[in-house]
Image: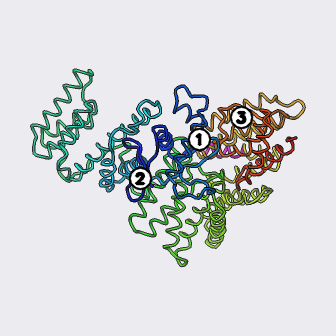
Amino acid sequence: MRIDVLGAARALRDDGSPVDLGGPRHREVLARLVAAEGRMVTTDTLVDDLWTDPPVRAVGALRTFVAALRRALEPDRPPRDPPRVLVTEGPGYALRLPREDVYVHRFQDTLARARRDSGAVTDLGAALAAWRGPAYADVPGSAWAQRERTRLEELRLEGVELHARILLDSGEGDGLVAELGALVAEHPWREPAWGLLARALYRAGRQADALATLRRARTMLVEQLGLDPGADLQRLERGILNGSAPPEGARTTWTGPGVRLGPRTTVALARTLALAGGDALVHSRRDRLTAAQAAEHTGDLSLTARIIGAYDVPAIWSRADDPEQSRAVVAAAERTLTALGPDGPADLSARLLATVAVESRSADLSGTELKRAQQAARQAEALARDLTDPALLAFALNGVFLQSFTRPGLAAVRDRIGAEILDLTTRHELPNFAVLGRLVRLQSASALGDLDAAASHAKAAEQLAAATEAPLVSVLTGWFRARATAARSAEPGGPTAATAAAHYRAAEDALRTAGMPGLHRGLFPLALLGLRLLHDRPAPTDPHLDWGPYRPWARPLVLLAQDRVEEARAALAAVPEPPCDHMQEALWCLTTRAAVRLP
């Protein structure tokens, strides 16, 4: 199954035949989920995006569209089997397809790869050729589609320019004059396009036409915008005049997103940037995957293993920020492990196994995947202990920690893991993993109700973070401090519940831009629910709260707060067993609380 929105939205079977998606609303629902790039879109957002003035039964109509799309996309799915492509997640829906099966995602990934590796120019040309018209062309009136169209058109133009630049740099590019001439005619304000057209003309032996093109660009910019040409165009004009313009086969250097880096440099930079949080963390994860894929393409098994295992960034939360990306990393690590075989270098095997354990976040796994990840964690730990490599052992213990949520009541076990990480990293001066040790111990002490010990670990973690320039640490400790304030609000003379709620809101604001959606989604509503239950108040019922992955466990209490007792009873009966993650004990408590409150 492939989905294409580079033009009118359509779906294609593996043999290339089109799928009947239904009417315009059906296609718009599918297109909106494509635009979310695998993230969940709430029902409320979908309704608002589909209708300017939603009808009374908008939610019901949306569900009808989704049901029809599921039948179209998975016609052979047995009635009782859960959907695998268009899935229900929390309070909304998400599209679950590999990125290479969604043309717009494949285009974006190819463009990102070409920015770093000019060898991807052929793939970039094919990705550009896949455009059939404006993106989301059959959703002309929707604000969300217009935003996406504008964004993707800018990326397409960047891709056209980058494709031409790489070809010209390598001495190729016959036939670019016509393509670039059309580009500047349609987009006359893009200075890079004028420069590329002049270079293409110069390469074709048309020096006079190249100079005329640059003078046209100058005239247009000065007369219509009051701007002189930029430094690049001026330098190119001087080069053409004196015969020093880039010759065939010369590789010019460019900065910014087009810098070409090898996989070793890319993963080293990604590893460093990961600790900065925000957009840097998001780009770090993507660059790490790009480096791993580039290494695999070299066919050098040792290089691939080292690149995949080099991203030993401490991880604290048991739910992935980008599950699809994590699965791709795990798959690459497992392929490399298989290729290395049982007699492969122990240090490389240990790092690959630790990568599998760390990237296989327990909340996102099936039972089989969970067992495989737990086994990888144990094997990585055993190999690391035999090798007496403290940095490798710290990385392996990170995997052991993330796979230690097999059942409730294991906070003391995790505290021992944190204590060993802390002791190891203090003795061997590994400050980033020392921060991890502190945060593990903070979480464990908080789970055990020892808020004084947790506060001590929070303070120590913040001091380490100041020295290692790790701003995400204060985001995490801020949540602990809000939790401690909430606990004290139930004590005589403690802060008010309103003060505790304000602390949670401040922690939420800090987390919103931290680049950790796996942690962020649903955490704030869950915290408010816990605070209300602590003060024996009903659950929050604001329809705009995004409960994220915790919705099934919160829903019975929300329905009870709305006096919808029978619906609450049905919701409680449908509550699944909590996933093996940080929140499993809290979710069990919510289930129990709902059961006790039901008459």
Image quadrant in which the C terminus is located:
top right
Q: Is residue 386 above or below residue 597?
A: below
Left or right, residue 511 beside residue 51:
right
- Does the magenta stretch mainly form a helix, a strand or a loop? helix
Question: How is the structure coloured here?
Answer: rainbow
The Cα–Cα distance between marks 1 and 3, rounded to whole angstroms, is 33 Å
Single out the mark in the foreground, 1 or 3: 1
User: Badge 3 local density, few (<14 within 10 Å), some, or many (20+)?
Assistant: many
State the residue in front, 299 or 143: 143
Seen at 48% across and 44% down, the residue is 34
Q: Which residues are magenta?
A: 459-467
Single out the mark in the foreground, 3 or 2: 2
Total numbered labels: 3
Element carrying mark 2: strand
Which three-letter amino acid code belongs to the residue tagged 1?
Answer: Arg
Residue designated by label 1: 63
Residue designated by label 3: 504
Q: Is residue 385 above or below residue 474?
A: below
Q: Where is residue 271 shown, x and y percent of the image?
A: 52, 52
Say whether residue 485 is visible: no
The Cα–Cα distance between marks 3 and 2, rounded to whole angstroms, is 46 Å
Q: Where is residue 28 shown, x and y percent of the image?
A: 47, 39
Q: Is residue 5 above or below residue 430?
A: above
Left or right, residue 494 beside residue 66:
right
Say the numbered circle drawn on residue 554. none
Nearer the N terminus, badge 1 or badge 3? 1
User: Badge 1 local density, few (<14 within 10 Å), some, or many (20+)?
Assistant: few
Element carrying mark 3: helix
Which three-letter amino acid code belongs to the residue tagged 3?
Answer: Tyr
* Residue 543 among those drawn in magenta: no
